[in-house]
Every structure is written in C-alpha cells, then in structure tokens.
Amino acid sequence: SAEKNMAFRLMRYATAAMQRHLDKGYDRVPLVVPLLFYHGETSPYPYSLNWLDEFDDPQLARQLYTEAFPLVDITIVPDDEIMQHRRIALLELIQKHIRDRDLIGMVDRITTLLVRGFTNDSQLQTLFNYLLQCGDTSRFTRFIQEIAERSPLQKERLMTIAERLRQEG
C-alpha cells in the first residue's frame, strides 16, 4: 500500500546498506539504488519518492543535505574567542586542548568561566567525564584541585561533582 514516508524509509534502507558495506572494511561508500515496486490500489503512486520533499521546507533540506555539511573546527578558533562563547566555552576549550600534554595551563581560563557563572553542574559533570575518558586521568585530581583552589566559591561544588564521579567509577 502507498505510504506517505516511503521515500524516507527507502533512504534509511539505502543508508543502512551503505553502513553494512563500510562495516565489512571497505573505505568507500557504495551507490545504493532505492527502488520501490508498487502494486497498490491507488494508481499512480500518490506520494513523492524524493525524500527531501518530506521536509516542511524541501528547498532548505535540499541545500542542507546535498552540500558539504557545516563545520565548526574548534582547533583553529583562538582561545580568546572561545572565552566569549559563554555557556559552551568550557566544553569547547577542553575539546580543543584535551590532547595537550598538561591541562594545568587551562586552569586560569576555566576558573574565569566558573567565576563568571557560565557553567552549571551538568556541564561540569560532562567536563569531568570527558576528562576521565579522553584526558590524562593520572592528572585529573590535581587538575580539579587547582581549579577548586583558584575559585573558592565553587570549590565545594567542584569537589562534590568530582567525588560523585569517583563513586560512579
């Protein structure tokens, strides 16, 4: 039977086939031809088979999904500019510098963001989790202590979140 979202469904099937191909070790995405054999009661097939037509704004969808995707390359954004990003500055800074040999150099900037009130507990927990997963975990405690010492008003909050993470493993 005719299905209004069939074009999107066919696109999902095609994308899944492409992913299976990549999962087998190939490094190029194959062309997959989504093909619908229709024999329903309504004739001709009543819906568009262009998946982009299923969006509220097909022209915008066409522009978004047929051009190169937007990129925010945080590695080339100067730290001073990142500091102006307020609520996302903390996570951007850490993502940019996570591979630095020693993150202690970031303590002043992070403390500044904490003092300005641009971070909430959820962001701090995300930061700590990210540091533990991707950073130098042997220096994690020292890093947190440095931040806590430089922002005494935030010290208890920081240590509580860090302790909660330690307990969670």
Image: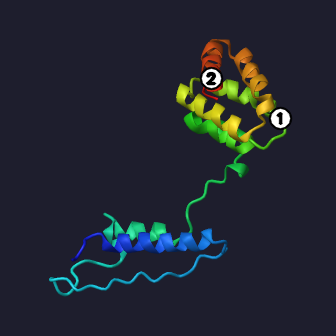
Q: Where, quadrant-wise, is the C terminus in this rendering?
A: top right
Q: CA distance from mark 1 to mark 2?
A: 25 Å
SS at badge 2 = helix
Q: Is residue 88 left or right of residue 140?
A: left
Which residue appears at 55% of the width and 25% of the height?
Answer: 121
- In depth, the one of 153 and 25 nearer the eye is 25
Looking at the image, is 160 positioned above or below residue 121? above
Residue most extreme to the left: 41
Please name the amino acid that badge 2 sits on: Gln
Q: Where, quadrant-wise, is the N terminus in this rendering?
A: bottom left
Looking at the image, is 159 positioned above or below residue 127? above
Give neighbour class at mark 2: few <14, some 14-19, many 20+ (Cα, 10 Å).
few
Residue 70 at x, y = what percent? 56, 60
SS at badge 1 = loop
Which residue appears at 49% of the width and 69% of the height?
Answer: 16
Based on the displayed image, in which of its 4 quarters is residue 6 positioned? bottom left
Residue 102's mark?
Answer: 1
Please name the amino acid that badge 1 sits on: Asp
Report the mark closest to the observer, 1 or 2.
Answer: 2
Residue 4 at x, y = what percent? 25, 71
Residue 14's mark?
Answer: none
Which residue appears at 45% of the width and 70% of the height?
Answer: 63
Residue 167's mark?
Answer: 2
- Marked residue nearer the N-terminal end (1 or 2): 1
- In depth, the one of 90 and 169 nearer the eye is 169
Looking at the image, is 35 positioned above or below residue 19? below
